[in-house]
Image: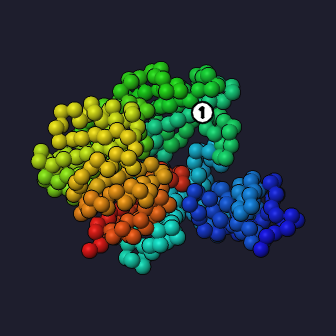
Amino acid sequence: MELDAGERLKVGEILEVEIGPIAHGGHFVARHNGQVIFVRHAITGERVKIKITAVNSKIAHADLFELLISAPERVSAPCKYAGICGGCDFQHISLSAQLNFKRSIILEQFLRIGKIDLVTEGFDLPMHQLSPTDGLHWRTRMDFAVSPQGKIGFFGARSNSVIEIDDCLIADERMKVSDLVNRSWKSDARVEVAVSSTSEISVMRSGRSISGPTQLTEQVDGNSFRISPVAFWQSHRNAPTTLVKAALAQLAAKPGDWVCDLYSGVGLFAAQILHQVGRQGEVTLIESDKTAVADARKIFSKYENVSIFAGLVDQQLAQVKRANAILLDPPRTGAGESVIKQMVKLRPRKIVYVACDPAALARDAKYLKESGYKLDHIEGFDLFPMTQHMECVAGFSPAN
């Protein structure tokens, strides 16, 4: 039933509500007169006053205005910009509770979108924590905005305004954010900082190098990668090693296998897959980003059993005629139905999906199920503590 004008929520309105379950995207759900409100900086079970920040025909958004009854999971945020800066969502929640909330998001997305009840189907869904107990100083890639006053910061949540900062507690300490804070930047610039596993530091302004090497050396499980600072690389300092180990354990490639690495980036997974398939095996990489492709061509230039296709996976996968196993690590939008259909035509005995968005993974898991593949394994990784983001590794095999 449509609400009349007098019942509709208005921006700036302050309400008292009880906070319900967490929703995908880092908000918690509250309701008022049947209207759904997505609330930032609250926790399930809390009684709070909220301030409406945005309203549309279906939902409203709000920020915590006053805490009346707090949840046991609530902690003091370590950063003074928590709730102001748009970079972190969960600094007010204990790390153990963050894991539980992220696990519940994955379960809900699979049930609602994928039509797969992970609990009743017997999946434990372990959530792995990679960071120290404080969840800070893990991020090795940072992209700062610049204020009109020439100071670095981040865009506020749902805002184009830059919140100036004097430190960032999730940034790798080797970045020396305090040094960047003390510099004056052009107001239309973006400041991109990357720290490698070998402690090289690159600083770029709007895509142009201003200090540090133009190629970083990353080392993972005995493999060395020389990559551009702007090429995609997992931002958590422990993520590359952790994800390679988890994904390849599920892939279980054998000597002589032909393996496809889709959305391959610079070849993080492919480098280790090569060790599994040996000289008699073949590894095919497909990647659309030109910088990553250029880096991958250099990294694998000495391997005759590596093929690299530059372009969109949806368009390039048709060139692949054989695959015993497929590993894919798509962007947040996921692979999609067209790519799933092309993958299953190759009839791989194993598909391993590394996902940074549980909604996209749940949707693609549904496509795979409808195409004759069953979910064998799924686990979650908190590669982004203090934020609402998470990573999953899922394994699929033919149902029959």
Residue at (65% x, 46% y) in the render: 157
Residue 4 in sight here: yes
Q: Residue sitting at 77 percent across and 74 percent down?
A: 1
Which quarter of the picture shows residue 40?
A: bottom right
Report the coloring of the rendering: rainbow
Q: Residue at x 69, y 37 (%)?
A: 161
Q: Which residue is found at the position 52% from the left and 35% from the top?
A: 143
**Foreground residue, 296 or 62?**
296
According to the picture, the residue beneath numbered tag 1 turns out to be 145
Can residue 247 be seen here? The reply is no
- The location of residue 328, given as percent across then percent down, is 35, 52
Position of residue 369 measured from the top left corner of the image (x, y, whole percent): 38, 69
The residue closer to the viewer here, 170 or 364, is: 364
How many callouts does the rendering have? Answer: 1
**Given the current orientation, which residue lies at the most extreme right position?**
6
Percent of width and height locating residue 215 = 35, 27
Foreground of the two, 139 or 24: 24
Location of residue 221 with respect to 191 vertically, above or below? below
| Viewport quadrant of the C terminus | bottom left
Packing grade of label 1 (10 A; few <14, some 14-19, many >=20) is: many
The type of residue carrying mark 1 is Ala
Q: Residue 253 location, x and y as percent?
A: 20, 56
Per the image, label 1 sits on a secondary structure element best described as strand
Residue furthest to the bottom: 120
Q: Quadrant of residue 289?
A: top left
- Residue 385 shown left or right of residue 222 in the figure: right
- The answer to whether residue 155 is left or right of residue 315 is right
